């Protein structure tokens, strides 16, 4: 028997972290054949009511259904032999964002980090899940290299559930170990009703700390900290660091940290869009010094640039020539990188964001690790990058995960291309976008979970006879399944968290070529209907949490 009270399936236990809520252990799950992380709530917080324990378990099940590359899903929730609640998560090797911030984070990396967190939270919010305890220690930085910087969000709602159980005084009676007064929103600290805008406030505090190394409000105690944040506006970045910051960066932080939730961004999607529009993203100030149309100013300045700025300047100058070489006469340099003045704000932002996307695509074309896929993720989709990949037409997959689609007709440039797979999950991809990509002659795989595709879009998908693989989590009902039954080649179907019923499941018996089906999270589907479907489709592997 394990002295900590964990089941015998967990082997090679190693403590890897501890905090106010409890301890975290790395363990090898002998059933799953992989390492997992076990977070056990400390003993003095473990005496919880049966209703709270049930709530923990219900939330763990809901979180387990979230699928996003910047989230660490919950695999299980249970009690140790000693009665302490614990969660089982995928083990992710990395460092806490708090440690990374302590070493200093650039503006560009800060925005990249916040954008990834916001994209993950946008996905969670779309599924009705609010984090309620966003803070740097709940963000794992998997890779700190700028070009591969990646984060994972963990620990949804644990502190909030316990604080509710122990009462409103829990913030102070335990020396502020429950909840995070430094990061929680004013309304949450007052025990008022919270929604996704509370997470946006916490995200703003994280961004503030990334940029300044400090939080906007910090008193001598939890009560004093709460009083400060409930009593007025936060300081500006410039006031804290003593130097001027880009006005749009100030506006981004200020809007996240607004005292009144109504004055904040209304959604995490809006936060992602705001980050995309900030000129400082991608070291814009240095880029604007390059006047590509004037050969006299194409030389590097006499004064040495900071190392990363200088490298980026050279890359961008080479980038123009490289792009022209790749694209031939169809795209001229001025079309790719027309530099405009700062006061032409909208055009400037879009042009500079487009440069960044083009740069990333050119890098991907040279890297073996991207040999099957072009990725334009977490950013707005512009015409030039789409035109580039349409003309290259030399890979199998396009990955637009968590992208922002504002000009659907730009996707029409892909019509007639040979790309076979497209991923648009966790984005605002809608029926207008779908209409364009369905013009791709060889498209046979679509991953479109958590998008804005409507029942009319599902009907349009059913008319594209080439589809072999579909992932349509959260958007298919019984009528939609009747339409999808018209696809003669469909072999792999994922429809998790969909409002289908046993009647719709019966329709799936018509999918005679189906080899794999995932229907987890479909609450209105019975086990008996699943058993009947397995008998009707003996060659199909059916995965469901109802088994």
Image (spheres, grey):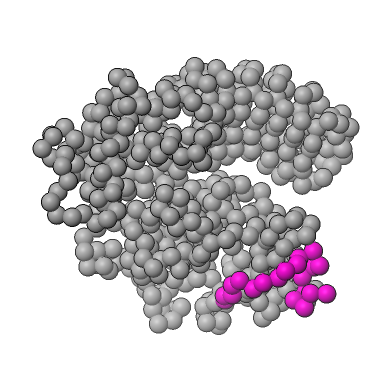
Name which residue lies at 78% across and 60% down.
30
Quarter placement of the N terminus = bottom right
Name which residue lies at 63% across and 54% down.
73
Image vertical order of residue 390 relative to residue 184, above or below: above
How many marks can you see? 0
Question: For this rendering, which residue is in front, 332 or 498?
Answer: 332
Image vertical order of residue 333 relative to residue 180, above or below: above
Q: Position of residue 265 (x, y in %)?
A: 40, 50
332 vs 83, left or right, is: left
Asked where in the image residue 536 lies, by quadrant, the reply is top right
Q: Is residue 14 magenta?
A: yes
Q: Position of residue 448 (x, y in %)?
A: 58, 34
Asked where in the image residue 81 lies, by quadrant, the reply is bottom right
427 vs 360, left or right, is: right
Q: Position of residue 277 (x, y in %)?
A: 33, 44
Q: Which residues are magenta?
A: 1-21
Name which residue lies at 51% across and 57% down.
142
Report if residue 192 is visible in the image. Answer: no
| Residue farthest to the left, as pictured | 296
Name which residue lies at 54% across and 33% down.
372
Q: Position of residue 292 (x, y in %)?
A: 19, 35
Question: For this rendering, which residue is in front, 493 or 151?
Answer: 151
Q: Is residue 417 magenta?
A: no
Question: For this rendering, which residue is in front, 526 or 303?
Answer: 303
Asked where in the image residue 60 lies, by quadrant, the reply is bottom right
Quarter placement of the C terminus = top right
């Amino acid at each position: 028997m394990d002295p900590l009270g964990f089941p015998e399936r967990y082997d090679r236990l190693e403590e890897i972290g501890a905090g106010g809520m409890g301890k975290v252990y790395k363990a090898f799950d002998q059933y799953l054949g992989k390492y997992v992380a076990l977070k056990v709530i400390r003993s003095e917080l473990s005496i919880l009511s049966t209703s709270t324990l049930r709530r923990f378990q219900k939330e763990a099940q809901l979180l387990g259904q979230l699928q996003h590359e910047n989230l660490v899903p919950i695999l299980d929730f249970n009690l140790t032999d000693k009665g302490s609640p614990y969660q089982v998560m995928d083990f992710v090797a990395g460092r806490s964002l708090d440690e990374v911030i302590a070493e200093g984070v650039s503006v560009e990396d800060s925005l990249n980090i916040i954008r990834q967190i916001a994209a993950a939270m946008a996905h969670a919010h779309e599924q009705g899940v609010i984090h309620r305890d966003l803070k740097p220690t709940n963000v794992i930085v998997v890779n700190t290299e700028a070009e591969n910087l990646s984060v994972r969000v963990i620990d949804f709602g644990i502190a909030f559930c316990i604080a509710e159980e122990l009462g409103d005084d829990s913030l102070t009676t335990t020396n502020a170990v429950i909840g995070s007064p430094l990061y929680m929103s004013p309304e949450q600290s007052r025990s008022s009703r919270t929604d996704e805008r509370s997470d946006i406030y916490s995200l703003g505090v994280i961004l503030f700390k990334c940029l300044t190394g400090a939080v906007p409000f910090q008193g001598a105690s939890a009560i004093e900290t709460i009083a400060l944040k409930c009593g007025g506006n936060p300081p500006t970045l410039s006031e804290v660091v003593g130097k001027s910051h880009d006005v749009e960066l100030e506006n981004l932080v200020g809007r996240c940290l607004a005292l009144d939730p109504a004055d904040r961004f209304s959604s995490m999607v809006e936060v992602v869009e705001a980050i995309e529009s900030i000129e400082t993203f991608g070291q814009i100030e240095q880029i604007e010094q390059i006047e590509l149309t004037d050969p006299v100013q194409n030389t590097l300045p006499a004064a040495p640039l900071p190392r990363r700025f200088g490298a980026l300047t050279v890359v961008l100058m080479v980038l123009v020539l490289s792009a022209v070489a790749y694209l031939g006469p169809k795209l001229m340099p001025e079309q790719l990188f027309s530099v405009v003045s700062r006061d032409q704000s909208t055009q400037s932002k879009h042009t500079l964001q487009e440069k960044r996307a083009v740069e990333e695509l050119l890098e991907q074309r040279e890297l073996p690790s991207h040999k099957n896929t072009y990725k334009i993720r977490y950013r707005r989709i512009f015409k030039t990058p789409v035109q580039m990949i349409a003309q290259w037409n030399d890979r199998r997959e396009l990955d637009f995960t968590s992208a922002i689609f504002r000009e659907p007709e730009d996707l029409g440039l892909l019509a007639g291309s040979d790309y076979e797979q497209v991923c648009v999950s966790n984005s605002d991809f809608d029926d207008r976008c779908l209409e364009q990509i369905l013009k791709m002659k060889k498209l046979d795989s679509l991953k479109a979970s958590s998008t804005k595709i409507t029942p009319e879009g599902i009907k349009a998908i059913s008319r594209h006879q080439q589809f072999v693989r579909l992932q349509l989590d959260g958007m298919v009902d019984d009528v939609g399944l009747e339409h999808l039954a018209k696809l003669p080649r469909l072999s792999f179907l994922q429809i998790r968290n969909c409002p289908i019923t046993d009647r719709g499941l019966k329709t799936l018996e018509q999918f005679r070529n189906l080899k794999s089906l995932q229907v987890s999270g479909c609450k209105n589907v019975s086990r008996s209907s699943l058993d009947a479907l397995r008998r009707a489709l003996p060659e199909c592997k059916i995965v469901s949490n109802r088994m």
